[in-house]
Image (cartoon, coloured by chain):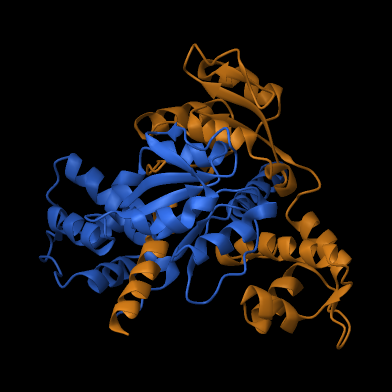
Chain colours: A blue, B orange
Amino acid sequence: MKIFSKNQLQRYPIYLKFFKEVEASGQKYISSPAIASVLGYSEEQIRKDLQAVSNDAGRPKKGREVKRLIETLENFLGYSEPIKAAVVGVGHLGVALMNYPNFSDMGLAIVAGFDIDQNKIGKEVAGKHIYSTEEMEEILPKFDINIIILTTPSKCAQEVADKAIRAGALAIWNFVPAHLQIPSHIVIENVNLASSLAILSHNLNSLMRLRKSI
Amino acid sequence: MKIFSKNQLQRYPIYLKFFKEVEASGQKYISSPAIASVLGYSEEQIRKDLQAVSNDAGRPKKGREVKRLIETLENFLGYSEPIKAAVVGVGHLGVALMNYPNFSDMGLAIVAGFDIDQNKIGKEVAGKHIYSTEEMEEILPKFDINIIILTTPSKCAQEVADKAIRAGALAIWNFVPAHLQIPSHIVIENVNLASSLAILSHNLNSLMRLRKSI
């Protein structure tokens, strides 16, 4: 099995998005230099990334066929067969994610929500039923849900994650800014807004210092 | 000026979060090996990261003072003086971000919202006024807003980003899964959920293959 780095995996949806835009514009072939000029990666990195998922090296001068690139990446990313997930914690962020229109294009299907609030349990959000977190052990296997999208308040995130794992969840997509202790056989991916913001702030501060010094 | 890599910048909020938990537990000093055992970074990386923002090398055996580490990181990340931002596109995700309780701990203050929907303009979300996007040129300088949090539908993201930049925005925190063309003097940071999901799916698939093969 090939080993992919985190940075490399992160690039594939960006390639895919771009290739779909290229296809929509009517262009049939694309070369590594053309990809490089738009996405800002080096040509060598692009060739390495694409060769890791495809044996098609493209044609000299013309480049690679866009349609095939899209098929290859959709297949690699598993977009043809969406994985099922449930949102746990149906607050503002949970509701936003349940209504997010782009997940179906990213191979993710949110099929249920869980909350502890009696006013939410039994209701529907974006057409999906909200269950009690007490029902996770029954509902996760019933709907073949492997992924928990965690959007609870920070203070109960660990407890809810533990409960989801006991109920059979194999992966946690964690939107809570809390450091969770997760067994090594469970997959966790943190969406860390503080980290993203740290990069933004740092670059903004550098820019503002530069403007002041001019 | 020191140069920080993206990966390095991303780690500082994670250190800070952890040091605050350590402080809350009553512990006064912490060593690099102790940090390494919880956060999973190498001891060498931790020393390198902390030395880049602080001259305090800590005491042999005891380690570094937690309180000073927190002060140093809060200062480095600019948490003492929050930067002002506006959400542009007050849909489900925009509302969720305007209500997000953790931004104040991350040095970000959302002070306004913008939308094109007449039913939203003039209303308040999380205590903040919603203005027409047509008013950006007036409102951004008035409230000293440098950052735009972009949460519009994909199809109008580029147009709205262009408008925000003309209105004086210096940085865009982009939550839209669209590839934006931004002038090089403007800071852009993409929150790419598709990239995060690609890592999660890949690791989940590896896990499931492993389970089948046992």
Q: Quadrant of residue B198?
A: bottom left
Q: Is residue A41 above or below residue A214?
A: below
Left or right of A212 in this view: A72:
left
Left or right of B92 in this view: A143:
left
Residue toward you, B43 or B180: B43
Q: Is residue B179 above or below residue B99?
A: below
Which residue sits at x=48%, y=28%?
Answer: B91
Residue toward you, B27 or A153: A153
Q: Position of residue A160 (x, y in %)?
A: 59, 57
Q: Quadrant of residue A190?
A: bottom right
Left or right of B101 in this view: A187:
left
Q: Quadrant of residue B99?
A: top right
Q: Quadrant of the C terminus of chain B?
A: bottom left
Q: Position of residue A51 (x, y in %)?
A: 23, 72
Q: How many marks?
A: 0
Which residue sits at x=52%, y=38%?
Answer: A121
Which residue sits at x=10%, y=65%?
Answer: A59
Q: Is residue A73 above or below residue A203?
A: below
Which residue sits at x=56%, y=31%?
Answer: B95
Q: Is residue B51 above or below residue A19?
A: below
Residue toward you, A89 or B123: A89
Q: Position of residue B174 (x, y in %)?
A: 49, 42
Query: Do we see residue B72 in this rendering?
Result: yes
Query: Do we see residue B148 in this rendering?
Result: no
Q: Position of residue A132 (x, y in %)?
A: 52, 45
Left or right of A68 in this view: A131:
right
Q: Quadrant of the N terminus of chain B?
A: bottom right
